[in-house]
Amino acid sequence: MADWNRRNGTGRTEEMLDSENQSRVEGLAGKISRLKGIALDIETETKHQNTYMDNHMMDEFDSSQGLLTGSMNRINHMVSSGKGNRKLMCYIIIGLIILFFLSYYLITKVTSG
């Protein structure tokens, strides 16, 4: 019976299909290995970025936190230390308000004309 199938060409068709399947399996294996390499590269880059963020960004946040804490301590000391400093603080606040309105006036004048 197998002899009859070979004479008919069915054996050849099976061999062609098998060789085509093998070539597709090899192509798929190549694509999978490339994807694995890309995934490993992404993992390495992610670990590198996380290390960078842990080391450098935390230092930046710590330094800015120290700067803000120092500024708040100086302001609290100035406000609580007496009448002279309260006058100075009022002058600073009034000056900032005048500066705000002056800049607002100038910006509206420039944008409208």
Image (cartoon, rainbow, N blue to C red):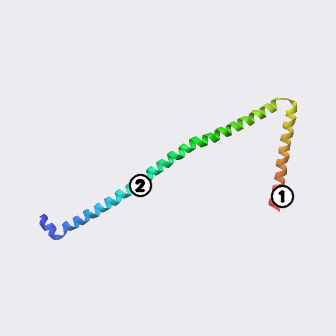
Foreground: disc 1 or disc 2? 2
Residue at image location 15% in from the left, 70% down from the top: 7
Which image quarter holds the C terminus?
bottom right
- Please say if 68 is above or below 112: above
The percent coordinates of residue 36 (x first, y second) are 41, 52
Which image quarter holds the N terminus?
bottom left
Residue at image location 44% in from the left, 53% down from the top: 38
> Tags 1 and 2 in contact by the CB under 8 Å rule?
no
- Please say if 4 is above or below 85: below
The percent coordinates of residue 101 (x first, y second) are 84, 49
Q: How many residues crowd around disc 1 within 10 Å: few (fewer than 14), some, or many (20 or more)?
A: few
What's under tag 1, amino acid-wise? Lys
Q: Which residue is the site of mark 1? A: 109
What's under tag 2, amino acid-wise? Leu
Q: Nearer the viewer, residue 1 or 80?
A: 80
Residue at image location 25% in from the left, 62% down from the top: 18
The percent coordinates of residue 52 (x first, y second) are 56, 44
Number of callouts in the render?
2
The percent coordinates of residue 86 (x first, y second) are 85, 33
Q: Nearer the viewer, residue 84 or 99?
A: 84
- Looking at this rendering, what residue extends furthest in the top direction? 81
User: What is the number of the mark on residue 35?
Assistant: 2
Q: Earlier in the sequence, mark 1 or mark 2?
A: 2
Q: CA distance from mark 1 to mark 2?
A: 59 Å
Q: How many residues crowd around disc 2 within 10 Å: few (fewer than 14), some, or many (20 or more)?
A: few
The quadrant holding residue 96 is top right
